Amino acid sequence: MVTKPYDCIIIGSGPAGLTAAIYSVRAGRSTLVVSGPLPGGQLMLTDLVEDYPGFPEPVKGSELMDRMRKQAENLGVKFISGSATEVEFKEKPFVVFVDGNPVKGKTVIIASGASAKTLGIPSEWKFMGKGVSTCAVCDAFFYKGKDIVVVGGGDSAMREALFCSKICKTVTVIHRRDKLKAQKVLQDRAFATKNIKWVWNTEVKDFIGKDKLDAIKLLNNKTKKETTMKIDGVFIAIGHRPNTDIYKGQLELDEKGYIAVKDRTKTSVHGVFASGDVHDYMYMQAVTAAGAGCMAALDANEFLQGDEK
Ligand code: NAP
């Protein structure tokens, strides 16, 4: 069956994707959002959002995303659940395969975001979901009253540590340097929390246990001393990697694997745009992603106007 191409297909349904969808449909363009493996994106794994303008009281990440999705649906955006598994950008209309099934678009906005990084130690995967996690909001409850570790020194690590401190007995932040990278307000809050402890200049080298995690092997990178720490759970919060695997060979990526954009949100393929964490590793905020989604939709609309002339 030949289906009419959408004016705009948006890959991803986080703040970038949904804002792009709202702007695209309001420009009168038929718009399809491919929801992706985590509909709503990373904010669905965030507890409270305090820095999104317009919400004087903290708002749950999931509620913020539900509201954006409802707004998009009310305006007439279509959604398809599933993940983009392959793209064909060499010919127009572009083709996006959603779990193997093709949908066509005159333009595509990639807003597929980024995912949590892991340490690259084989044993962390053995215990993923059995003592090791990358999401405190999802899993901290399983460690109620227990001793846990958070690895990392950035905003994510502080957020995870603060979240866990309300549920777990103790939270030990293990950081590879002696200084945090996190914003000061989060550092101050974490330092002031009694059950958060600190281990500096230390790297996790191995995860130990039988069916579930029992302990971790640590290396102090200053003294070179190795120790073993008994622990119930470890949350890895060391940053993110872009979800760009399916675009390799289809459009230009930068040296870190993020989508390269030039001239606002334009990628190396005319008619394909990128917005949010999939190309931005500097700001990575819900509000900057939303702003970039708006820009991408306006750029896509301008492209369509040019195309239609
Ligand atoms: P990040 O700022 O890149 O911090 C990653 C942390 O993990 C750093 O402290 C880094 O150490 C450490 N790390 C990286 N690789 C490691 C490894 N292999 N082993 C051990 N430690 C490792 O990442 P993020 O915290 O996820 O934040 C990313 C962006 O999202 C930032 O722009 C941040 O502001 C934003 N964000 C904001 C909020 C918020 O509440 N507003 C919440 C989460 C994220 P070094 O310090 O040595 O580099």
Image (cartoon, grey):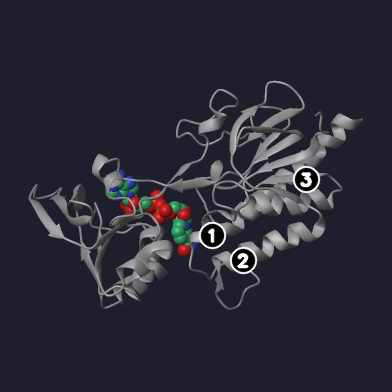
Mark 2 touches mark 1? (CB < 8 Å) = yes
Residue 63, quarter of picture: bottom right
State the image coordinates of residue 52 (x, y, percent, origin top left): 59, 66
The mark found on residue 43 in the picture is 1
Please tell me which residue is depicted at 66% across the width and 53% down the height of the picture: 291
Label 3 environment density (alpha carbons within 10 Å; few <14, some 14–19, many ≥20): many
**Tag 2, which secondary structure?**
helix
Is 43 drawn above or below residue 197 in the view shown? Answer: above
State the image coordinates of residue 28 (x, y, percent, origin top left): 87, 48
Label 2 environment density (alpha carbons within 10 Å; few <14, some 14–19, many ≥20): some
Please tell me which residue is depicted at 57% across the width and 27% down the height of the picture: 252
Which numbered disc, 2 or 1, marks the residue that appears first in the sequence?
A: 1
**Tag 3, which secondary structure?**
strand
> Residue tagged by mark 3?
31
State the image coordinates of residue 257 (x, y, percent, origin top left): 48, 34
Quadrant the N terminus occupies: top right
Please tell me which residue is depicted at 55% across the width and 42% down the height of the picture: 278
The amino acid beneath tag 3 is Thr
> Residue tagged by mark 2?
64
**Tag 1, which secondary structure?**
helix
Which numbered disc, 1 or 3, marks the residue that appears first in the sequence?
A: 3
Tell me, yes or no, if residue 12 can be seen here. yes
